[in-house]
Image (tube, helix red, strand yellow):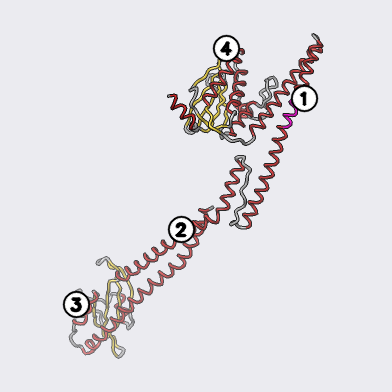
């Protein structure tokens, strides 16, 4: 918007300058040409009055006045008789016929003739003035002056250039002042843009409306603040409800499972015992669902990020999950450094992300397959990946796998919240979670987190140990 305002200011200024300077330049050009023509015409009349007496009396022409004028002004002076034959020419021999020249022919009829034409011989524009030499109504001849008009055109050109320079100075001044004014005008809108961008990132805190903004902008800022406050309140209530409900459901579900287990022990073997065992499995699944809902609610809450040694966490979680992988006849491998790879994340979130990804990978991997946990760096980011040799997912399934409660099939164990929890935790740290096919079969879950440097105390400890 600042650029559009500045372009508008410059456009208006340019239109005003053109509307003022173009007529002024045209007027100046016409005035200079008229002044020059009038001066030369006056000189021609003065000279013609001198030669009028000479031609009227039939005396011999005196070239001195014409030659003196030609020396002073650089003009060419031609004097002809009534037939158009030159009697005096400061540049050529006499006796030439000038009656075919339009200006001479017009002057022989008793009228003055002026104009400008280009001379190919001299390569310049010439001003010509032809006046009749007459007395008592009889035309005795013509006096023609031809003067180089280049000096006039140079003055006009210099004037045009000065106008152009003035226009550039004015435009530059308007650009500087206009930029400052445009920035001042759009500052409140930029503040609103910053607030809207923070809304999109999940930060619903709104600064007070700018007092220097117009009333309309202040009203918009106030409305955005009210909207953000209302959204923050609703989202907070929703998260609080999920968290409270999860906490409240834990105790009765635990009690219900204990009662069912006691009941199963008293029933012994039989159909009733099988029903009790199925009910226990359902309560166990409900407990897992409640736990996952609580984790998801916590993951969606804004929390401060800290530097985390992702490589160390990955090595610890791989070691922890090795036992369960062995039970499932799956080999767990660690690829990459085991320490010294730092990223920003919510404390405890990297562990939860890896636990969810490893749980899915170990469950999906067939017996005898391997699951690889890798940690690496990219410019500005840290990349964790968990790769399995399971059946993988279709393109549609990979898109929906991050949706809450989605499962590939009803037979798939779990609550359908593992990947959404990992995804929310990655986003809370400013990172991403993506799913892709693993070359050779299987699935790769890749987490990208912002890279950071090691904390000062960790660097000092590493230096002292080294």
Between marks 3 and 4 in the image, the one whose residue lies nearer the viewer: 4
**Which of the two labelled residues, at mark 1 and mark 3, occupies the earlier sequence position?**
3
As helix, strand or loop, the secondary structure at mark 2 comes to helix
Give residue 77's position: percent from left, percent from top. 24, 77
Q: Please indicate whether residue 249 sits to the left or right of residue 131 in the image.
A: right
Q: Which residue is mark 3?
A: 94
As helix, strand or loop, the secondary structure at mark 4 comes to loop
**Which of the two labelled residues, at mark 2 and mark 4, occupies the earlier sequence position?**
2
As helix, strand or loop, the secondary structure at mark 3 comes to loop
Give residue 466's position: percent from left, percent from top. 42, 24
Question: Start and end of the magenta stretch?
Answer: 244-252
Q: Please indicate whether residue 94 sits to the left or right of residue 335 in the image.
A: left
Check residue 245 for magenta coloring. yes
- Label 4 CA crowd tier, 10 Å (few <14, some 14–19, many 20+): few
Decide whether the magenta segment is chiefly helix, strand or loop: helix
Q: Which residue is mark 4?
A: 368
Between marks 2 and 3 in the image, the one whose residue lies nearer the viewer: 2
Per the rendering, the mark at residue 176 is 2
């Amino acid at each position: 918007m600042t650029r559009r305002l500045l372009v508008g200011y410059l456009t208006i200024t340019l239109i005003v300058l053109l509307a003022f300077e173009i007529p002024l330049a045209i007027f100046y050009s016409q005035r200079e040409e008229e002044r020059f023509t009038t001066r030369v015409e006056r000189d021609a009349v003065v000279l013609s009055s001198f030669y009028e007496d000479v031609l009227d009396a039939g005396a011999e022409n005196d070239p001195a006045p014409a030659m003196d004028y030609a020396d002073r002004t650089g003009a060419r002076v031609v004097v002809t008789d009534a037939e158009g034959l030159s009697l005096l020419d400061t540049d050529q021999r006499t006796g030439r016929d000038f009656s075919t020249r339009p200006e001479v022919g017009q002057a022989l009829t008793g009228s003055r003739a002026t104009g400008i034409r280009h001379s190919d011989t001299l390569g310049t524009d010439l001003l010509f003035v032809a006046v009749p030499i007459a007395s008592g109504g009889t035309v005795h001849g013509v006096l023609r002056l031809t003067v180089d008009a280049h000096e006039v055109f140079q003055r006009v050109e210099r004037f045009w250039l000065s106008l152009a320079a003035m226009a550039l100075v004015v435009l530059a001044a308007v650009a500087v002042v206009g930029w400052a004014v445009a920035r001042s005008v759009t500052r409140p809108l930029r503040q609103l843009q910053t607030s809207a961008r923070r809304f999109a990132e999940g930060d619903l805190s709104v600064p007070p409306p700018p007092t220097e903004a117009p009333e309309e902008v202040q009203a918009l800022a106030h409305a955005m603040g009210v909207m953000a406050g209302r959204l923050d309140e609703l989202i907070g209530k929703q998260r609080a409800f999920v968290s409270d409900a999860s906490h409240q459901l834990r105790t009765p579900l635990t009690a219900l499972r204990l009662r069912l287990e006691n009941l199963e022990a008293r029933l012994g073997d039989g159909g009733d015992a099988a029903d009790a065992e199925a009910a226990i499995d359902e309560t166990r699944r409900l407990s897992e669902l409640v736990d996952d809902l609580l984790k998801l609610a916590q993951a969606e809450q804004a929390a401060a990020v800290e530097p985390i040694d992702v490589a160390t966490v990955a090595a610890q979680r791989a070691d922890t999950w090795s036992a369960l992988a062995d039970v499932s006849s799956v080999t767990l491998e660690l690829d990459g450094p085991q320490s010294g790879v730092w990223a920003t994340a919510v404390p405890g979130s990297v562990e939860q992300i890896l636990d969810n990804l490893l749980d899915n990978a170990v469950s999906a991997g067939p017996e005898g397959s391997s699951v690889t946990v890798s940690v690496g760096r990219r410019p500005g980011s840290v990349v964790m990946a968990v790769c399995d040799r399971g059946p993988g997912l279709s393109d549609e399934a990979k898109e929906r796998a991050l949706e809450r409660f989605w499962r590939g099939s009803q037979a798939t164990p779990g609550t359908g919240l593992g990947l959404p929890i990992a995804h929310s935790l990655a986003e809370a740290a400013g990172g991403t979670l993506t799913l892709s096919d693993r070359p050779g079969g299987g699935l790769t879950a890749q987490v990208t987190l912002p890279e950071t440097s090691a904390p000062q105390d960790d660097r000092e400890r590493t230096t002292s140990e080294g």
